[in-house]
Amino acid sequence: MKRLLIVLLFGALALNALARSQPAVHGVVDLAHEFTFYGDGRFARQYLRDQKAVTSWGTLYKFDLSNANLLVLLGCAPQLCYCPEDIAVINRFLQEGGGVVIFGGSDHGPQNELAKTFGVEFEKGARAPLRGTTEKIEGAVGIRLKLTQPGFWTVLLTDAVKAPVAATRKIGKGQLLVLPRALAGNNPDASDPRNADWLAPLLVRVASGKRVDATKPFKGRGLTPGDYVEEHEGLKLHYSDYLKPYASSMFAIAQRCKPVIEKRMGVPLSPGMASEIGLLATGAGGFSSGRVLGLAVWWGGFPEREDSMIEFITHESVHSWVLPFAEIWNEPIATYVGNLVMMDMGFAEEANRRIQATIKRATKHDPQMKLYDMQGNSRKGAPKLEGGARAELQWGKAFWIFEQLRKEKPDFLARYFQAKRRLASKEKIKKYDANNTVAMLSVAMGRDLFPWFRELGFDVDRTKAEIHE
């Protein structure tokens, strides 16, 4: 027994020594030049799983990189660039031993311009298969590297004709890694850890030129507070140096939308909800966390076009407006209110076109609107809808229902949310399901809607509702 304890003790010491010998990585993923939901934590989960990683939503050259040793540059929106201050910080980080990773493609203008400052360029023309590792390389093949001074580089991957595809070079005490964006994951649900067996240990090596102190704070910079904060009439706007040119137009349209949304919703925002807006460097995507809205500054061609931005701001605002209980048709109702606000703000023709197009897509699956509920389930034996068909049904059928109610009472939404604000609280009900939704709509419309919803394929029962008036 004594001998066994000694063996176990030495084994534990050996494992601890091995753990201490593993290079510690403190990685920073830049979101300020281009926001993606994937970049917000998903890259780190796929490739830095056993390391520390944070995100930087603010101006890159203002980020404290003193206790970081890896900087990941996934992309840069074509409307932006890496400014001289950014490039100076990246160079200084490399000189100190940090590792920098530039992902890019031939059509990624700012990424290419940044890469050129280090003697490399992304270009089309790579041919399968890729070679250079025993691991199977996944991802689209098509981008290769053009090296200005090949002697400075260590080529890691080549294509079928031995053109470089991924390469590193020493700069100061650090290392620069350049490779096509298609070789890493991209899905917002982190379901595509492409080349993780090859890329994850490579990132550790790239970061190994600089020691970090795990006992000291290592924190990211979130969307709020941003580098700049404007406040007016209870609304805060956060943005980085890069998005400063868009701040005034975003602030103005958000302020114009708010009273129009409130009129359609029939109730003011709950205290603190949607009270802060953070600008995102993207034209595709946004979110609501309740208090904070993240808004894509180039959504729908803004600032040249306003219609889609009105819909978008309304959509994200409604997610906050409906709290504390989300809707069973949470995404569709947010966009539907956005279309109504578009009408109110001078874009009636386009708003009506969008509503009717959304309804039309649902009629492919449910021509009479009597087969399916919002989850794509049928009480009448029709096959369950999945994927894109289910989404088309969810959105289109919700819009159709809203339109029927609006024909009867043009202000039905205001009536509905006024009733919801009065009758649905966490003290009064436990959940907000289809039964409570139909009960609330019945209050708003002044008549029992349960029979109608059952005709429409919803499995609802008044006796199961918690809402009563």
Image (spheres, grey):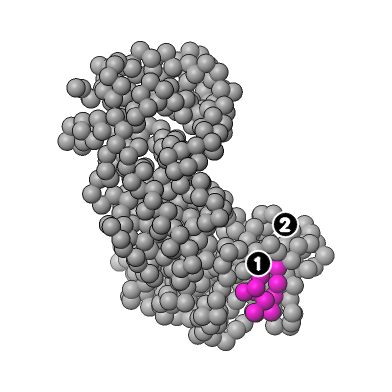
The answer to which quarter of the image holds residue 158 is bottom right
Q: Residue at x 39, y 48 (%)?
A: 257
Residue identifier under label 1: 109
Q: How many labels were placed on the picture? A: 2
Is 241 in front, or is 216? 241
Q: Give the residue number, with chain letter if any, for mark 2.
A: 141
Whether 114 is among the magenta residues is yes
Q: Residue at x 37, y 46 (%)?
A: 317
Q: Can you see residue 44?
A: no
The single residue placed furthest to the front in the displayed view is 346
Helix, strand or loop at mark 2:
loop
The answer to whether residue 23 is magenta is no
Residue 72 visible to the viewer: yes
State left or right for residue 428 relative to residue 37: left
Task: Tell me if residue 422 comes above or below residue 11 in the rendering.
Answer: above
Instruction: Give coordinates of residue 189: x percent, y percent.
Output: 49, 48
Closest to the observer, 428 or 358: 358
Per the rendered image, the range of residues in magenta is 111-122
Question: Horizontal placement of 202 versus 279: left or right?
Answer: right
Outermost residue to the right:
161
